[in-house]
Amino acid sequence: MLQEFVDVLIIGAGPSGCVSAAYLHKNGIKIKVVEKTVFPRIVVGESLIPRVMDHFEEAGLLEALDKMNFEKKTGARFIRGEEICVFDFSKKFTDGWDWTWQVPRADFDNTMAQEIIKKGIDLEFQSEVVSVSFVGKKSITVIKDKDGNLKEVHANFIIDSSGYGRVLPRLLDLDTPSKLDPHSSIFTHVNDVNRPEGEEGTLISFDILETQVWLWVIPFSNGNTSIGVVGPTTFINSLAENKDNAEALKNAIALSDYYTKRFSGLDFLFEPVKLENYSRSVKQMYGDGFALTGNSSEFLDPVFSSGVAFATESGILAAKLYIKESQGIAVDWEVEYTAYMKRGIGVFTTYVKEWYTGNLQTLFFHQPENHDVKSKICAVLAGYVWDETNPFVKKHDNVVKNMAYLINNEA
């Protein structure tokens, strides 16, 4: 069997894998990336948050992405009937990027993948991981290429950025139930021919249909718009009698007073994709000779667009810690990786839970607006969830719940 020898094997060429690969390559590490699918491919996670810009810049991918002229995202809008709450990232508590992008992921991911190939990184598409075995920290991974040929990749370390493929969690039995209630989503794209001029036509929006059910609307610079519905799995399954995804999504759009006129009657550009019970978790985020990044470790919920940010945060951190370790510096993966990532994940988990209880919605739509509170929540929504000078980060366990209680009990 053919053998290859690398320092780091990266499984998956999504944002997490590409950021890891570009950063490691920049630092002289020999790597190989294997990706099961062919790019471009349709995937969810089209709304980014500002924190990701730090990672793209650090990995040397920002310039290539910027040239694509993706739709600029300067904030986010939440709609509940007649009530509207707009967050502006330039008015957030924590210093950092004031904008990011909303992107068709097929084009976005392909841009990054082609850029890392251009940098000289060995990226192999249509290559599937068949098995992994470890001897100490070193690994032997058997890969099957598009022609069915098998080869061994010997690596000092594996970064699993396989997303929903969850390669190592599957092979090493690392999956564990999520702490979040089962939710599902259905989404597609439309040619947004009724798009209004100006900001209204470009702003990402979350339209609350019921406390736990909402519609996302993500306009792209190419004239298309992503539309998706999210809710408890039982509700999503009840949207169409025959579980027809297109019918279910049409019925969800019809529930939106705000968007029915804009989107009703438009053809879907592809058969709507359903993600059922999408929240994921793992027993451990690293082990001897490997680290799990992005959705291959944790996926929470699309409501605050945290998926890509956790993917790139974990991807670049795993790369940095590997470099540190390869230089003979001791790394405490439990503290420096798991505990760090869990802090940020914990903050967002609280916000996701309090969104679905309705407590966070109470804060969003309370009038008159409290600009100080709003700027601190805005920093969380921008992804700066490790800034513990922000009380809405440091005291996330109670602050949203307590403030909602006070508002609900105002005289």
Image: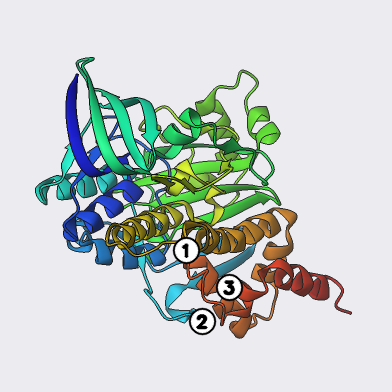
Colour scheme employed for the rendering of this structure: rainbow
Q: Give amino acid for label 2.
A: Phe
Task: Bin the neighbour count of mark 3 within 10 Å (Cα to Cα): few under 14, some 14-19, many 20 and up.
Answer: many
Residue where numbered disc 3 is placed? 377
Most distant residue in the bottom direction: 372
93 or 79: nearer the viewer: 93
Q: Give amino acid for label 1.
A: Glu
Most distant residue in the right direction: 411
Residue 328 in the image: state x and y as whole percent.
30, 62
Question: What's the distance in space between the residues labelled 1 and 2, CA to CA?
Answer: 25 Å
Q: Give amino acid for label 3.
A: Ile
Question: What's the distance in space between the residues labelled 3 and 2, CA to CA?
Answer: 8 Å
Task: Bin the neighbour count of mark 2 within 10 Å (Cα to Cα): few under 14, some 14-19, many 20 and up.
Answer: many
Residue 379 in the image: state x and y as whole percent.
51, 74
> In the image, which is nearer the foreground, mark 1 or mark 2?
1
In this picture, residue 227 sits left or right of residue 113: right
Please tell me whether mark 2 sits on a helix, a strand or a loop. Answer: loop
Q: Check the image and report above or below for 333 versus 238.
A: below
Which badge, 3 or 2, is on the more N-terminal residue? Answer: 2
Residue where numbered disc 1 is placed? 336
